[in-house]
Image (cartoon, helix red, strand yellow):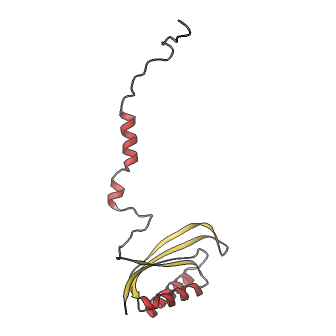
Amino acid sequence: MTTRNYEMMFVVGADLGEEQLDALLQRVQRYLETAQAEVFSTKSWGLRRLAYTLKGQREGRYYLAQFAAPTQTINDLDRSMRLIEEVLRHIIVQIDKVEMPESPEEPSPAEAEAPAPAVEAEAAVAEAPAPESPAVEDAETPAEA
């Protein structure tokens, strides 16, 4: 069996209680175990506003799971995820290598310390003296002469 690396992003409804959410995450974990997946990480991206209404929901909780699994089991995992009513959307994507992404809310320490390039450029423009241009009022026009 060929084993490949995958990422699965799924969105669940924001109206789920803590117990329901824990039960759902355990269910997804069981599906991954059934698919013979080796889970590298599972991260919560938190509650976010959806671009459009999904199953009557305006907000959802995002989760990202990275795992390695045999290619033959991915279709069954996809089908199992479609059957969970609490999951609003999901996607499973094959990836080349597993990278441990940070949550979008948590910038890396290097990004937090370094100012954005656009901000530096604006500061340089603000500090530079303005070029002097001849006043328009002082110049004589050919019609007046």
Report the front residue among 53 and 74: 74
Residue at point 51% right, 90% down?
Answer: 76
Residue 52 coordinates in the image, percent (x, y)? 63, 67
Q: Is residue 54 above or below residue 128?
A: below
Residue at point 39% right, 28% down?
Answer: 130
Residue 105 coordinates in the image, percent (x, y)? 45, 64
Please identify the residue farthest to the top as the structure is shown. 145
Report the front residue among 61 and 73: 73
Q: Is residue 141 above or below residue 116?
A: above
Q: Can residue 113 be seen here? A: yes
Would residue 70 be found to the left or right of residue 56 on screen? left
Residue at point 41% right, 64% down?
Answer: 106
Q: Is residue 135 above or below residue 88?
A: above
| Res 79 quadrant in image | bottom right
| Res 103 quadrant in image | bottom left
Report the front residue among 7 and 88: 7
